[in-house]
Amino acid sequence: QVQLVESGGGLVQAGGSLRLSCSASGRILKINDMGWYRQVPGKQRELVAAITSGGGTNYADSVKGRFTISRDDAKNTVYLQMNSLKPEDTAIYYCNANRLMSVSGFKDYWGQGTQVTVSL
């Protein structure tokens, strides 16, 4: 059974920083693309940042220049460094592993989500 567990969310003032972590555990053979999504009540979940197995990155326009995604394949972990946070960044942040290969085959996995709240 593969699990993704996020950590690092919390309450921060506008202009502050947070670092989210997401660790994958289980009988993993290969992790392909990983990403961070966020969702606020009443809105669709949106992509924040993604990173390929080769290290290529992609960001939502709203976070470019402020957020940085990275990964440590030795630890099966993906990070999201969030700087210059704004109140509109407030959301539940979810980690995603796209087409993760385990002993059970290929499947997409999601973490349970971590709350990020940015106050004025």
Image (cartoon, rainbow, N blue to C red):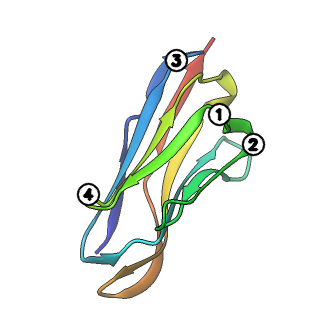
Q: Amino acid at mark 2?
A: Asp
Q: Secondary structure at mark 1?
A: loop
Nearer to us of marks 3 and 1 is 1
Residue 35 percent across, percent down from the top left = 53, 57
Q: Quadrant of the N terminus?
A: bottom left
- Residue beneath disc 2: 61
Identify the mark at residue 75; answer none if there is no mark: 4
Q: Secondary structure at mark 3?
A: loop
- Residue beneath disc 3: 16
- Residue beneath disc 1: 65
Q: Amino acid at mark 4?
A: Lys
Q: Amino acid at mark 1?
A: Gly
Return the disc, 3 or 1, that comes first in the chain's sequence.
Answer: 3
Category of crowding for the residue at label 4, using alpha-carbon neighbours closer than 10 angstroms: few (below 14), some (14–19), many (at least 20): few
- Farthest residue toward the top? 120
Q: Are marks 3 and 2 in contact (CB under 8 Å)?
A: no
7 w.r.t. 54: above or below = above
Return the disc, 3 or 2, that comes first in the chain's sequence.
Answer: 3
Q: Is residue 70 left or right of residue 74?
A: right
| Residue at 46%, 79% in the rendered image | 107
Work out how far the residue at label 3 is from the one at label 1, CA to CA, in angstroms: 14 Å
Return the disc, 3 or 4, that comes first in the chain's sequence.
Answer: 3
The image quarter in which residue 56 lies: bottom right
Return the disc, 2 or 4, that comes first in the chain's sequence.
Answer: 2
